[in-house]
Amino acid sequence: MFRDDIEATSRRIIAVAERGRMWLTTAESCTGGLIGAALTSIPGSSAVYDRGFITYSNAAKTELIGVAEALLARHGAVSEPVARAMAEGARRRSGADLAVSVTGIAGPGGGTADKSVGRVHFGLAYGDDQVLHHVEDYGDLGRTQVRLAAVRTALGLLEWGLAQALERP
């Protein structure tokens, strides 16, 4: 279903999370559930992943994972503060140990001078209320390629977050 690199990364994530007895969750906007699909394509993933949030609209971000309407109004959905709030909210609402979020503009339209097509913000909530932010400007690669690139980046962040969580005493 997914390209070999995505499947291999998903397998590693599931194996490491299971060994560490850690729960994972996702909060996805522009990827529309592809990160969760990549993780759940691995047999045994239910031992570490029991839910994800597809929050494509601003209303869903607010209702499902508690992103403040004022934050969305002030910064827009495709922003660092919203990516962070999505990760924090998903982690809090699910009880997971790690949560990754993604919000961006996959195209072909929707870009502006300030937020171009291909810009994607990520959040990773882990540890003792730590939230990492990462942004990528993939460019106008086409909708499918931007979304797949975002899946790869999000999985990489989850893998990094698991390593950080398991290193702590």
Image (cartoon, helix red, strand yellow):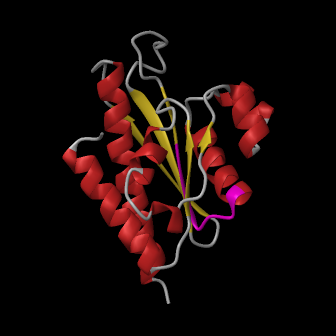
Using residue 87 as the reference point, say whether residue 8 is left or right of it: left
Rendered location of residue 16, percent (x, y): 38, 73
Residue at the spot 42% in from the left edge and 22% down from the top edge: 106
In the rendered view, would you say 148 is above or below 21? above
Using residue 117 as the reference point, say whether residue 75 is left or right of it: right
Q: Would residue 122 be seen by someone viewing this image from the given angle?
A: yes
Residue at the spot 53% in from the left edge and 73% down from the top edge: 22
In the rendered view, would you say 72 is above or below 52? above
Q: Looking at this rendering, what residue extends furthest in the top direction?
A: 109
Rendered location of residue 48, percent (x, y): 52, 66
In the rendered view, would you say 2 is above or below 108? below
Residue at the spot 46% in from the left edge and 23% down from the top edge: 105
As for residue 33 lying within the magenta part, the answer is no
Q: Which of 51 and 77 is in front in this view?
A: 51
Rendered location of residue 135, percent (x, y): 42, 40
Please report the bounds of the magenta region as a residue range: 94-101
Q: Nearer the viewer, residue 97 or 71?
A: 97
Rendered location of residue 69, percent (x, y): 79, 32
